[in-house]
């Protein structure tokens, strides 16, 4: 256990096992964990969030583990949530298992994220567009069947492209 791990374990041991928290703290538990973000340094971290069909979940995890072993990076946070819904256009929704992984930014992290992109496409997953600032346009086009319809609707609604964002520029929408 390294010094950062020991500091976290100590902080948890010193805190009360039960306490009342606000709705904000419940919905956004990491928001008050400023230290978590600072531990990644100036480079920060990638958050890769993907929704994988349940039937492909085990294969995705095995593939992610194999890629992680080659990537020379570390996972700082890993969480899973069950989803049930209907995916449409560019909405991050559908039925399956949502995985979120945080790992350091840098060459190894970028290589790992690209490997996860390949795995996501191969297993019918959809990446969370709002969580991944490096997500390439081609991945979104391949993973979201409603991409072209969404782009067409935007062009119809806003032909002069008055409403733009970094994401819309990167995806050519």
Image (tube, helix red, strand yellow):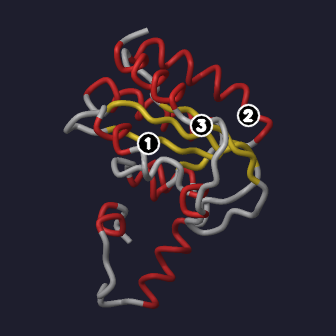
- Asked whether, in this view, residue 52 is left or right of residue 136, the answer is right
Nearer the observer, 51 or 148: 51
Residue corresponding to mark 2: 56
Between tags 1 and 2, which lies in front?
1
Q: Position of residue 134 (x, y in %)?
A: 34, 47
Gap in angstroms between the C-alphas marked 2 and 3: 39 Å
Tag of residue 158: none
Tell me the CA gap for discs 1 and 2. 21 Å
Say if 18 sits above or below 2 in the image. Answer: below
Q: Is residue 10 above or below residue 23?
A: above
Label 3 or label 1, whichever comes before in sequence order = 3
Please, which residue is most extreme toward the left here?
Answer: 42
Work out whether residue 146 or residue 110 is closer to the camera in this orientation and state it: 110
Residue count near mark 3 (Cα–Cα under 10 Å), binned few <14, some 14–19, many ≥20: few
User: Relative to 139, does residue 38 appear above or below in the rendering?
Assistant: above
Q: Which residue is mark 3?
A: 16
Point out residue 42 in the picture as x, y percentages from the top left corner.
Answer: 19, 38
Q: Residue at x 36, y 89 (%)?
A: 159
């Amino acid at each position: 256990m390294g010094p950062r791990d020991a500091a976290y374990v100590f902080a948890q041991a010193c805190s009360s096992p039960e306490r009342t928290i606000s709705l904000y703290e419940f919905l956004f538990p990491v928001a008050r964990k400023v230290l978590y973000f600072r531990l990644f340094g100036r480079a920060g971290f990638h958050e890769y969030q993907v929704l994988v069909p349940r039937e492909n979940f085990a294969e995705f995890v095995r593939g992610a583990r194999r890629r992680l072993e080659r990537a020379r990076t570390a996972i700082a946070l890993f969480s899973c949530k069950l989803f049930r819904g209907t995916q449409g256009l560019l909405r991050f929704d559908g039925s399956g298992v949502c995985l979120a992984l945080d790992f350091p930014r840098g060459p190894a992290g970028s290589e790992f994220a690209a490997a996860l992109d390949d795995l996501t496409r191969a297993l019918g997953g959809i990446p969370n567009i709002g969580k991944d600032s490096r997500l390439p346009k081609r991945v979104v086009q391949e993973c979201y069947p409603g991409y072209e319809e969404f782009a067409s609707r935007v062009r119809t609604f806003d032909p002069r492209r008055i409403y733009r964002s970094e994401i819309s520029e990167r995806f050519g929408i």
